[in-house]
Amino acid sequence: MKRHYFLGTAAGFSKKWRVMMRKGKGHHEDYVALQEYLVKEYGGRQAIPLINGRSAIAAILANYRECVWGDGGEVIINGFTCRAVVQGVKAAGFIPAYADIDRGTLNFTIESLEKVLTPQTRAVIVQNTLGNMVDIEAVEKFCRKHKLVLIEDLAHCAGRFYADGREAGMVGAAVAFSFGKEKSIDVCGGGAVVFRDPKMPLMSEPCGEPDDKAEFRARIYPTIGYIYRGLSYVHLSGVFMRLMLKTGLVRRSAEGEVDYKKVPLGDFQAKMALVQLKKRGKLAKRPLREFYLVRDRGEVLRKLASAGYYFGGFWYEKPVSPERYYKKVHFPEKECPEAVWVSEHIVNLPNYYTEKELAEVRRIIKEYKEAE
């Protein structure tokens, strides 16, 4: 039987990790240990594990609004991103300002930051898209010049280093983590915030209990993904996943709510996140995903599928993904033409396969020529 390579749908989890996720136990000490580790490693004053990454972004901005700015304003974000970032910004009472990107890095540039800067701009969120690192020295200088708060979003880049030698998360006034599916730290859900600004007052921690349903879904998702991949050989994977979604045993990542006041990260997910954070340097030797810009993406994807490479989705099919929510974010396409173009031509591959296993993918992509 021909080997299939699944570029998504929990394909990066080993058998050992699936078992650990199903059977492992967590305690409050694990939650505290994650907090202490984040504070120590990232030079923070406070760390709060939260239910997801969008809540971490909202928590940072809400704390600055309450303690420093007194009102909302605009926050500059990458013009090629996911809805979670937009959700976090809006939930805190701010307006996202999209800065167009460079094709080579998928990140905004100083020139595009300058174009969207207004007197209402309060902060810049650095994303380091797919693990491709932004020119942090230039962005840092830009923020200092305009008195903006620099926030680092480590969803794609925990453990990676900037060109100037500093690790991601060691530069900004605050750091947001996402521990969601296929992120650089992946425990199928959750996130955290680290406040590094020594002048910021401490933030109140969530006052409620962890979401047991969310933790249960996280525990079983690697196993559900394994079953899904097996059923693909008998053409039943689609039916199976629709059933999992209907019963609520699987939830699309984009469906998460923002909640930084009530719901903390569960103890078990905190434990598993800490396991990965401690070896983040090894996990991040390569970017989170390797990307190509192709002339005819549909043709390339069909060719890859015939060779046994299946995408569970790629980042991103629209400048703000997922596509089903795109119209709701009111993305300024005329102001971000590069982001629009990239979203129509990009193909990207997760880094959990070996160079040998990805060789055929690269050959097929190059056969169809990269877009110019």
Image (cartoon, rainbow, N blue to C red):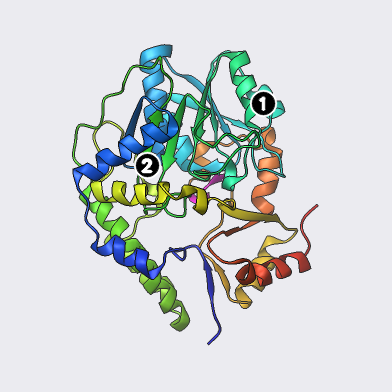
Residue type at tag 1 = Ala
Residue 254, given in percent of the width and then of the height, sits at 42, 48
* Residue for badge 2: 191
Q: Secondary structure at mark 1?
A: helix
Residue furthest out toward the bottom: 1
Q: Is residue 322 magenta?
A: yes
In the figure, is residue 362 to the left or right of 48? right
Residue 222, given in percent of the width and then of the height, sits at 36, 64
Asked whether the viewer can see residue 113, the reply is yes
Residue at coordinates 35% horizontally, 55% vertically from top-left?
251
| Residue 83, placed above or below residue 196 | below
Residue at coordinates 53% horizontally, 50% vertically from top-left?
284
Q: Secondary structure at mark 2?
A: strand
Res 30 quadrant in image: top left
Residue at coordinates 51% horizontally, 32% vertically from top-left?
152
Q: Which mark is residue 138?
A: 1
User: Closest to the observer: 276 or 92?
Assistant: 276
Residue at coordinates 67% horizontally, 26% vertically from top-left?
138
In the image, the segment drawn in magenta is 320-324
